[in-house]
Image (cartoon, rainbow, N blue to C red):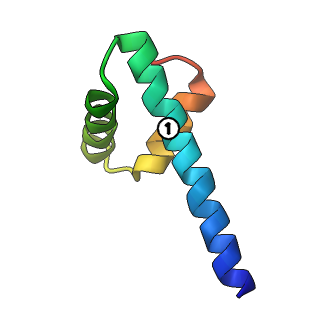
Amino acid sequence: LAGELQEAQQELQDRRVIDKAKYRLVRDMRMTEGEAYHQLRRMAMERNMKLVELARLLVERGTTK
């Protein structure tokens, strides 16, 4: 049960990071939420990265421009 809780908490944390990266694209690049999500997915695939890894890089870097 503790393992399931930890997994759920990690998934929630990952979702928050992805949302932060998505909203930076919305704000900085003037995209819709859907466009931003697809752009993140495309960028992750092109770089052979997991979506959450790319999102973390964008959030840590602090800018999408």
Q: Quadrant of residue 8?
A: bottom right
Q: Quick check: can you spot residue 65? A: no
62 w.r.t. 51: above or below: above
Q: Identify which amino acid the numbered label 1 is placed on.
A: Asp
| Mark 1 crowd level (few <14, some 14–19, many ≥20, 10 Å Cα) | some
Q: Residue furthest bottom?
A: 1
- Examine the rendered structure and indicate whether residue 64 appears above or below residue 6: above
Q: Residue at x 62, y 52 (%)?
A: 13
The residue that mark 1 highlights is 19
Looking at the rendered structure, the secondary structure element under dot 1 is helix
6 over 18 or under it: above or below: below
Q: Nearer the viewer, residue 38 or 65?
A: 38
- Position of residue 8 relative to residue 54, above or below, is below
Residue 60: image location, x then y, percent:
62, 30
Residue lying at the far right in this picture: please name it.
2
The answer to whether 43 appears left or right of 24 in the picture is left
Residue at position x 26%, y 29% in the image: 35
Q: Quadrant of the C terminus?
A: top left
Residue 43 percent location from the top left of the image:
30, 36
User: Camera-side residue: 4 or 49?
Assistant: 4
Task: Please provide percent x and percent y for residue 46.
Answer: 25, 41
Q: Quadrant of the N terminus?
A: bottom right
In the foreground, 3 or 32:
32
Residue at (31% x, 50% y) in the render: 48
Number of numbered tags placed on the structure image: 1
Examine the rendering and report whether any part of residue 61 can be seen.
Answer: yes
Residue pictured at 56% horizontal, 61% vertical: 11
- Residue 2 pos. (x, y %): 74, 83
Location of residue 39 by image quarter: top left
Would residue 45 be found to the left or right of residue 3 on screen? Answer: left
Q: On the rendered structure, is 23 left or right of 14?
A: left
